[in-house]
Amino acid sequence: MSMVGYILGLGDRHGENILFDSKCGDCVHVDFNCLFNRGELFEWPERVPFRLTHNMVDAMGPLKIEGPFRRACEITMRVLRQQSSTLLSVLTPFVYDPLVSWNKKSYG
């Protein structure tokens, strides 16, 4: 989800917007109101491409980010690049949706 969030410009990631299942370790993101880099318009703009805290890295075990996480990121980025035209055709209507407010006063 980190790479998909990065590509979509998904911001406002904090403990209440990333939910973990304590039984199986699955992760679910909620609150997608901050897409397409809107986090850069906050009063205190977001500076990181995706949320990866020390606690998250520690939970990855002894390999940290150099294990399955890195491999999953590499595979995800490759698939997103290969399917970029499909991804753009799905996302473009959201960018040009007249009902979406894109001004600075709406965020932050």
Image (cartoon, rainbow, N blue to C red):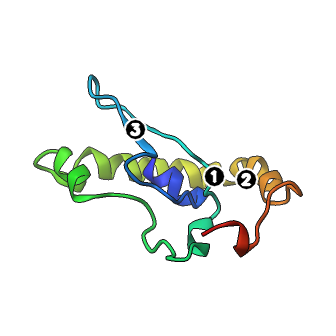
Pick whichever, 2 or 88, lies toward us. 2
Q: Position of residue 27 (x, y in %)?
A: 39, 36
Q: Is residue 39 left or right of residue 47?
A: right
Q: At 85% across and 55% down in the image, what residue appears?
A: 97
Mark 3: few, some, or many residues within 10 Å (few <14, many ≥20)?
some
Describe residue 43's horizontal placement relative to residue 106 as left or right: left
- Looking at the image, is 27 positioned above or below residue 74? above
Q: Label 1's element?
A: loop
* Residue at mark 1 to residue at mark 2: CA–CA distance: 24 Å
- Residue, x 72% and y 73% (percent of image)? 105
Residue 19 - label: 3
Disc 1 designates what residue? 33
Give the x, y percent position of residue 65: 24, 55
Q: Nearer the viewer, residue 85 or 57?
A: 57
Residue type for callout 1: Asn
Mark 2 element type: helix
Give the label on residue 85, or none.
2
Residue type, label 2: Ser
Three-letter code for the amino acid on which mark 3 is drawn: Leu
Q: Is residue 79 above or below residue 24?
A: below
